[in-house]
Image: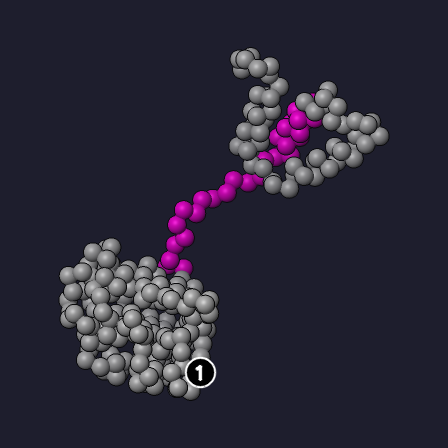
Amino acid sequence: MPAQPVIVLVRPQLGENIGKAARAMLNFGLTDMRLVAPRDGWPNPSAGPAASGADLVLEQAQVFDTLAEAVADCAHVYATTVRKRGVTKPVVTPEEAARAIVVEDGRSALVFGPERSGLETDDVALARTILTVPINPEFGSLNLAQAVILCAYEWSKHQAAAGALVQPTVEDLLPPAPQEEFEGMFAQLCALLEPRGYFLPESRAAASRRTLRTMLTKPAWNHLEIRTLRGVLSTLRREPGERP
């Protein structure tokens, strides 16, 4: 399995943003953070609280004086920027980069620039590929953590161990109820509608029943839903104030 990509933050300005980037990384299984000349030095006391528990990423973060040193062991370097800055290089989206990273030999680095100005031309020139997020041309303002999480998420979808990530709050769906239960509910509904003239005129009664049945079979109700619907129908049948 290819090594996970390195996340490189070049001259990050705020400890809070470094912490938020670490949190974004760990959400999708990335742990290798490298910092290039952080403005306020390292470690930064503001990073920990912002990381919200992603302490592992911060504790292992490495600091370098230059971008060249930070990516020295990487065969593939992606510079994230919204502008080419006069540098002619291949341009890919986060999804395209992720797809390439999981099949490329050698380690890859995703490089992010300072919060205020982004990567400089010399930084982009060092990379082999430009990574650009398709974005609203009238408002192209992504913060550092947002940019990191976009790339980390795309990598998590394409890498071989994606099965190690879990989808929260997923519940097993109950199977559709047996046809017998549906028929009981449908008969109860028709019994309520018939004395109120719903199936009149008589010449349209069969078609009306067919349309109603077709509509009600589409959701594939499970037995709990059928039971709930029958409870609703029983309630509607009672006179106001009548006890169950």
Q: Residues within 10 Å of mark 1 (few under 14, many from 20)?
A: few
User: Over which residues does the magenta segment extend?
Assistant: 163-191
Q: Quadrant of the C terminus?
A: top right
Q: Is residue 211 magenta?
A: no
Residue on which disc 1 sits: 90
Residue 165 screen position, x and y as percent: 37, 58
Looking at the image, residue 229 lies above or below residue 41: above
Secondary structure beneath dot 1 equals loop
Q: Is 111 left, or right, of 244 in this rendering? A: left
Residue depicted at x 54% and y 13%: 241
| Colour basis | one colour
Which image quadrant is residue 163 in?
bottom left
Which image quadrant is residue 193 in?
top right
Give the residue furthest to the front: 138
Q: Nearer the viewer, residue 171 or 69?
A: 69
Residue depicted at x 15% and y 61%: 45
Q: Quadrant of the N terminus?
A: bottom left
Residue depicted at x 60% and y 16%: 238
Residue depicted at x 41% and y 53%: 167
Give the residue furthest to the top: 242
Q: Nearer the viewer, residue 39 or 184?
A: 39
Q: Amino acid at mark 1?
A: Pro
Instruction: Evaluate whether residue 3 shows in this view.
Output: no
Residue 186 screen position, x and y as percent: 67, 29
Residue 220 screen position, x and y as percent: 60, 40
Q: Is residue 184 magenta?
A: yes
Instruction: Evaluate whether residue 115 shows in this view.
Output: yes
Number of callouts in the render? Answer: 1
Residue 34 screen position, x and y as percent: 24, 73
